[in-house]
Amino acid sequence: MKRRLLLFNVLFVMLLLAVACNQQQEIDISKSVRKTEDYLRQLDEISTTAGSYTEDEEQVKFRLLVEKHPSQEEATAMFNNILNILEKNSHNREFWDNYNGYFDIKSHKTGVIYKATKIIGKDLKVTPK
């Protein structure tokens, strides 16, 4: 009888641990986007930025406004910076497994210079305009 009770208790604890470990971490997307905007606005190469999100469509969008026309390598670095900072601010390593990202860099003089897309399960794709 004691063995059955001990076995039941062990199985119950293991079940609780399994359920607790498998719950998806909540992402406060509003706070993550706001903190990322604040961080990006402090960078010298960016004049201003605007971020938005839609939870129901699982999309994050960012626009960076710049004075100087960046090279494609610099633009890619800026877009990767957005990816990394959003993931960091969300406190969730799997952020980009849950959201698609759409980004662009716009110049004061010439309009949109680069666009980037980060689709769930795919790498970042940067295209000049």
Image: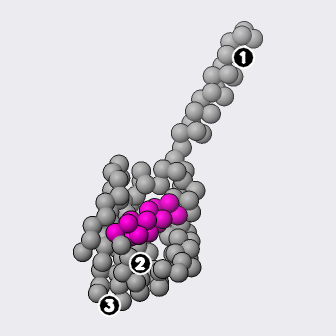
The quarter holding residue 60 reads: bottom left
For the point 60% across and 39% down, the residue is: 20
Q: Of discs 1 and 3, which sits in the foreground?
A: 3
Q: Of discs 3 and 2, which sits in the foreground?
A: 3
Residue 15 magenta: no
Q: Residue 94 shows which numbered tag?
A: none
Looking at the image, the residue that sits furthest to the left is: 129
For the point 35% across and 48% down, the residue is: 121
**Mark nearer the N terminus (2 vs 1):** 1
Q: Quadrant of the N terminus?
A: top right
* Residue 20 appears left or right of 103: right
Q: Amino acid at mark 1?
A: Leu
Which secondary structure is most common in the magenta stretch? helix
Residue hosting label 1: 6
Looking at the image, residue 106 lies above or below residue 108: above
Name the element at disc 1: helix
- Which segment is the magenta one? 72-86
For the point 63% across and 22% down, the residue is: 11
Looking at the image, residue 125 lies above or below residue 4: below
The quarter holding residue 4 reads: top right
Q: Amino acid at mark 3?
A: Lys
Residue hosting label 3: 109
